[in-house]
């Protein structure tokens, strides 16, 4: 696993995406899959920056077989976004509860998503098959 530790600020989003994309390009990840991973990574990192209260975030990336694994770790307020019920996407937008759509998209677009709170840290991991 390779790691990037950066300030938990939306101003660092490009740095985070460039870090991830560097490995996805090296692994010859298809553009469609790379886009899905980038959308998920953006959602997770922006949530950390806006809501966690953590000063920094650690992004770890690795590959096992044909699966990319990206883990986001922060020392902010404990919060499991996966515990929240999925939004009812059958309702018109004006009748839906606010929030939760981004994590819903992450859950639907990744092959595996997990959350854990370990040693005072939120640990959110996404896994995606990166072969065509």
Image (tube, rainbow, N blue to C red):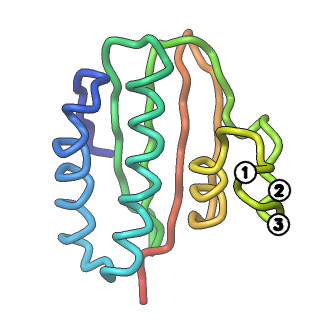
Q: Residues within 10 Å of mark 3 (few under 14, many from 20)?
A: few
* Disc 1 versus disc 3: nearer the observer: 1
Q: Residue at x 61, y 47 (%)?
A: 103
Residue 6 lies, in percent from the top left, at: 22, 26
Give residue 29's quadrant in the image.
bottom left
Instruction: Return the mark for residue 90.
Output: 3
Closer to the camera, 25 or 12? Answer: 12
Placement of 96 over or under 89, stated as above or below: above
Q: CA distance from mark 2 to mark 1?
A: 12 Å
Looking at the rendered image, the disc whose residue lies closer to the viewer, 2 or 1, is 1
Which residue, given by chain and number where applicable, does mark 1 sit on?
94
Which residue is pictured at 57% across the width and 11% down the height? 77
**Vertical placement of 109 versus 11: above or below?**
below
Residue hosting label 2: 88
Q: Are marks 3 and 2 in contact (CB under 8 Å)?
A: yes
Q: Name, please, the residue furthest toward the bottom.
A: 132
Q: Is residue 109 left or right of residue 45?
A: right
Q: Is residue 130 left or right of residue 107?
A: left
């Amino acid at each position: 696993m390779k790691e990037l530790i950066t300030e938990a600020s939306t101003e660092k989003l490009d740095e985070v995406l460039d870090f991830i994309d560097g490995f996805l390009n090296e692994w010859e990840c298809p553009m469609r899959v790379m886009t899905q991973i980038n959308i998920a990574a953006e959602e997770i990192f922006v949530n950390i920056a806006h809501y966690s209260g953590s000063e920094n975030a650690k992004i770890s990336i690795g590959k096992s077989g044909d699966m990319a694994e990206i883990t986001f770790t922060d020392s902010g307020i404990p919060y499991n976004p996966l515990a929240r019920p999925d939004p009812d996407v059958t309702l018109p937008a004006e009748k839906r509860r606010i929030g939760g759509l981004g994590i819903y998209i992450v859950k639907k677009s990744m092959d595996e998503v997990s959350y854990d709170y370990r040693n005072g840290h939120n640990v959110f991991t996404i896994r995606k098959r990166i072969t065509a």
